[in-house]
Amino acid sequence: NPTPRVFSGIQPTGIPHLGNYLGALQSWVSLQEEFSSVLYSIVDLHSITVPQNPDALRDSVLDMTACLLACGVNPAKSCLFQQSQVPEHAQLGWILSCLTSLPRLRHLPQWKMKSESQKNEGSVGLFTYPVLQAADILLYLSTHVPVGDDQAQHLQLTQDLARIFNYQYGEFFPIPRALMGSSKKIRSLRDPLVKMSKSDPHTLATVRLTDTPDEIVMKFRKAVTDFTSEVTYDPEKRPGVSNMVAIHSAVTGLSPEEVVKQSRGLETAQYKHVVAEAVITKLTPIREEVHRLRGDKGFLREVLTRGTHRARELAAPVYDKVCRIIGL
Ligand code: ADP
Ligand code: NA
């Protein structure tokens, strides 16, 4: 059996939001305790599939590093590194792209969505980035990948490519498994029918990890609910209030039923303040740590350099073997 190994990546696109934290980063932190080999990559090669400003991109990599550390990613327990600094990602990506058919990529829903947002003039890189994602995972012979359900089809592509390679050249890559978070999708505070997302143009829709307490209170106060003042949990019929219950539950660790019980007698307007306070309690230490770390860019670069070094030690021998296997 292959050594259990977790791999996950996040694009360096600004300060993560509450959805990223509750849906992904929190589980990244706990996986460090459950697995002895864990790699987390800031996937800057994926960011450049759409236009980027060079200085902003460089800053974003360091900001994301600060945010991950502040959330509890611990470089002593997991290998935290910058994807572009390990050239084997792009190299294995090329090899896997030669095993991928065009129709296989054309059918991925994210391509349709993202290329439409580029007015259907998306780059070749945007089209093939799921292959690079497969390379990210397979390069470390990873066995477990924490993914949101929006990424499930990309992990299937990774599994298919591992199987295609193994079938053609003999068993080599473990077939990586999804670790589906049990956490719920966090929804936009302005439109509870869509998920909270960094690309939401409405500034009040998304709570960022570095929002001040005042900003958090204001965003929750303006959150869209409905015309019933009681607090209940019914995501189908009452998505707005239920989103707040889900957030409240996620930041306190209590079940939705428990937070509803605690909030009996409150009107939704009052409840918004309770949830805002719970979010502030959760995010304050993170916000303070992000600010502290952002002031020490030398330290952040050092963390990435050390992580990159360890990642290359794992990646290089795997890539060499792949080359030998296929005759390069
Ligand atoms: P965004 O949707 O804001 O662009 P990403 O696609 O970069 O965020 O997602 C990074 C990680 O955060 C993924 O694992 C994704 O599943 C998770 N995630 C993103 N938005 C949410 C959300 N609203 N609720 C829960 N998890 C989320
Ligand atoms: Na996404």
Image (spheres, rainbow, N blue to C red):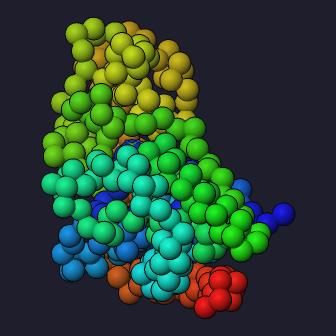
Residue under the point 19% across and 61% down: 121
Residue under the point 26% across and 67% down: 123
Which image quadrant: the N terminus? bottom right
Residue 129, given in percent of the width and then of the height, sits at: 40, 65
239 displayed left or right of 169 = left
78 displayed left or right of 216 = right
Residue under the point 65% across and 89% down: 327
Residue 238, given in percent of the width and then of the height, sits at: 34, 16
Q: Quadrant of residue 145?
A: bottom right
The residue nearer to you, when weighing 88 against 287, is 88
Residue 41, given in percent of the width and then of the height, sits at: 49, 70
Residue 197 higher or lower than 124, as above or below: above
232 displayed left or right of 124 = right
- Residue 272 appears in the rendering: yes
The residue nearer to you, when weighing 266 against 311, is 311
Q: Quadrant of residue 328?
A: bottom right
Residue under the point 37% across and 74% down: 45
- Residue 277 appears in the rendering: no
Total residue callouts: 0
Residue 258, given in percent of the width and then of the height, sits at: 54, 21
170 displayed left or right of 96 = right
